[in-house]
Image (spheres, rainbow, N blue to C red):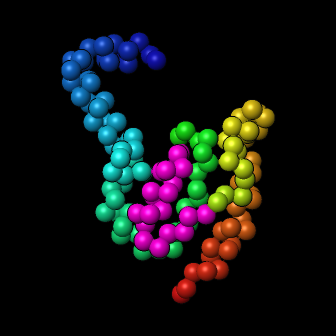
């Protein structure tokens, strides 16, 4: 961090700084009410396009299984499906030193299947 930025942060009123960071966190972090930061349940309920939600793995601490299930429940008609990789995918990719999204091409058949079920 540059000295000017560092000085600017330290010059702030600590109480105001904490309030600002708490307000920022409210719009960035998921809450019990909404699984997607910054998106309210009533907004999710208005989604009117076919939606597929991939179920999160039980080992994914950043995108919990509960989050994916709640998201699918809040979007009318959303389909919750299992991803085409194992439950420990992200951890395996990190340990192997491979790109996290190396197996995303495996999603293609699921996407084609989802599109084929859309009624126009």
Count of numbered marks: 0
- Work out whether residue 105 or residue 44 is closer to the camera in this orientation and state it: 44
Q: Position of residue 95 (x, y in %)?
A: 75, 32
Give me the residue at 54% from left, 69% from top: 79
Q: Is residue 67 above or below residue 100?
A: below
- Among the 4 quarters of the image, the one containing residue 55: bottom right
Q: Is residue 14 above or below residue 27?
A: above
Q: Which of 15 and 62 lies nearest the eye of the viewer?
A: 62
Image spot of residue 40 (x, y percent) = 33, 56
Q: Would you say residue 64 sits in the magenta stretch?
A: yes
**Magenta stretch?**
63-81
* Residue 101 appears anywhere in the view: no
Q: Nearer the viewer, residue 117 or 10?
A: 117
Q: Is residue 12 magenta?
A: no
Specify whether 66 is left or right of 33. Answer: right
- Please state, as top left, top right, bottom left or bottom right, where the C terminus lies in the image: bottom right
Q: Position of residue 58 (x, y in %)?
A: 60, 45
The image shows residue 111, relative to residue 91, as above or below, that is below
Task: Answer yes or no: is residue 39 visible.
Answer: yes
At 72% from the left and 50% from the top, the residue drawn is 86
Say which of 77 and 5 sits in front: 77
Q: Residue at x 33, y 51 (%)?
A: 33
Q: Say if 74 sits above or below 90 in the image.
A: below
Across and down, in percent, residue 12 comes to 24, 18
Residue 20 sits in which quadrant? top left
**Is 4 situated left or right of 13 in this image?**
right
């Amino acid at each position: 961090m540059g000295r000017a930025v560092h000085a600017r942060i330290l010059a702030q009123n600590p109480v105001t700084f904490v309030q600002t960071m708490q307000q920022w966190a409210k719009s960035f972090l998921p809450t019990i009410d909404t699984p997607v930061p910054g998106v309210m349940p009533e907004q999710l309920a208005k989604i009117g396009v076919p939606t597929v939600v991939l179920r999160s793995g039980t080992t994914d601490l950043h995108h919990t299984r509960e989050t994916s299930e709640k998201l699918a429940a809040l979007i009318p008609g959303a389909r919750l499906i299992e991803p085409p990789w194992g439950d420990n995918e992200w951890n395996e990719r990190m340990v192997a030193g491979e790109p996290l999204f190396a197996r995303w091409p495996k999603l293609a058949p699921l996407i084609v299947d989802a599109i084929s079920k859309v009624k126009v």
